[in-house]
Amino acid sequence: MLLSDVEIRDAMKKKKLIIDPFNEPNLQPASYDLRVGKRALVSGMENEIDLESRRSFTLKAGDFALMTTLESARYTQISERRKKKTIKRKLSNNMS
């Protein structure tokens, strides 16, 4: 999914997108820059890499890495029908 900075801000305002912690300088015209976290897994290696103690590593051609981020990001899109069902359920539970 591609969102502009305006759409990112709007989604966050509507609580459809949560980026925690949010840093305004990381918001770009068509993206949000996530910062590399503390751990990485590299294809072909058995152990994870501690990026706090090892500041860099080189990927060979064909390798890939999975890295944690300092931010957590979650996008939720709740359909109107699902919202109505949830509201009905909460109301009926409160009335019981």
Image (tube, helix red, strand yellow):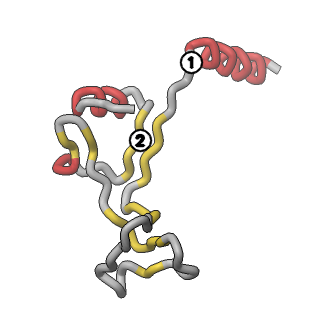
| Residue pictured at 36% horizontal, 73% vertical | 59
The image shows residue 35 at horizontal and vertical percentages of 30, 60
Residue at far right of view: 96
| Residue 79 image label | 1
Element type at mark 2: strand
Q: Quadrant of residue 5?
A: top left
Q: Amino acid at mark 2?
A: Ile
Say few, some or many: other residues with alpha carbon within 10 Å of mark 1 (under 14 / 14 to 19 / 20 or more): few
Q: Where residue 94 sits: x, y (%)?
A: 74, 22
State whether residue 49 is above or below residue 86: below
Residue type (three-letter) at the residue carrying disc 1: Ser
Residue 67 showing in the rendered view: no
Q: Which residue is mark 2?
A: 18
In the image, what residue occupies the spot 39% across and 26% down? 14
Q: Along the line of sight, which residue is nearer the eye, 94 or 22?
A: 22
Return the x and y of residue 58 as percentages of the image width and height. Answer: 32, 77
